[in-house]
Image: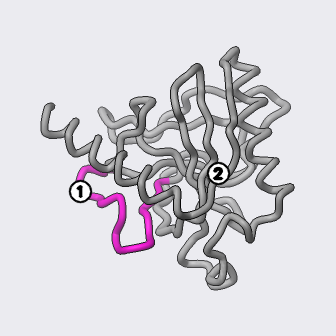
Amino acid sequence: MDLHRLPPSPSPGLLNLLVEIPAGSRNKYKYCPQTKVMVLDRVLHASVRYPFDYGFVPNTLAADGSPLDALVIMAEPTFAGCLIKARPIGLLDLEDNGVYDGKLLCVPAADPRQDAIDSIRQIAPSQLEDVAEFFRTSRSLEGRRITIAGWRDLDAVGPLLNRCIDAAAADDAEG
């Protein structure tokens, strides 16, 4: 699975999102760019499971040195390696051991039941808190220091996405 030619954004308002971990899983899979396959990175503690499908936007580079993370709200979990065209609706501002590690929240473009969702304000506060609590708990159990600043709406996504796309392009030019 070579992601090099996959654009982060196939068209305005959409992202390509590669699922690493399906909702409900304790298995932490990661895409390995050297081998171009998904690998089992670790198994999370029994008390935590991913609340939504979790992955990344290919050909982006976030402040933590990895691609920009994203979650997608799905009615059913997909699978590791699934490519989803998704609409971002907001982001969770968080720091992991002092490094900014924002998480985009998206809805799948292929689900007509979610066509009207275009803002984080349309998601139940309890669902948003479930996501924040997942990161607080899972990272704390790993001994990491987590600071969550809260949720931001769609207008915060563009600047973060553009920084991550530019950083990946600069990194490619250097390497």
- Please tell me whether the stretch drawn in magenta is mainly helix, strand or loop: loop
Residue 140 falls within the magenta-colored stretch: no
Q: Position of residue 114 (x, y in %)?
A: 66, 78
Q: Amino acid at mark 1?
A: Arg
Left-right relation of 4 to 117 = left
Q: Residue at x 55, y 78 (%)?
A: 110
Q: Secondary structure at mark 2?
A: loop
Residue drawn at x 52%, y 56% as measured from the top left: 156
Q: Number of marks in the image?
A: 2
Label 2 vs 1, first from the N-terminus:
1
Residue shown at the point (31%, 50%) measured from the top left: 165
- Residue interval drawn in magenta: 1-18
The residue where tag 1 is placed is 5
Give the foreground label among 2 and 1: 1
Residue situated in front as seen by the camera: 53 or 152: 152
Q: Secondary structure at mark 1?
A: loop
| Residue kind at label 2, given as amino acid type | Pro
Residue 104, compared with residue 63, is above or below; it is below
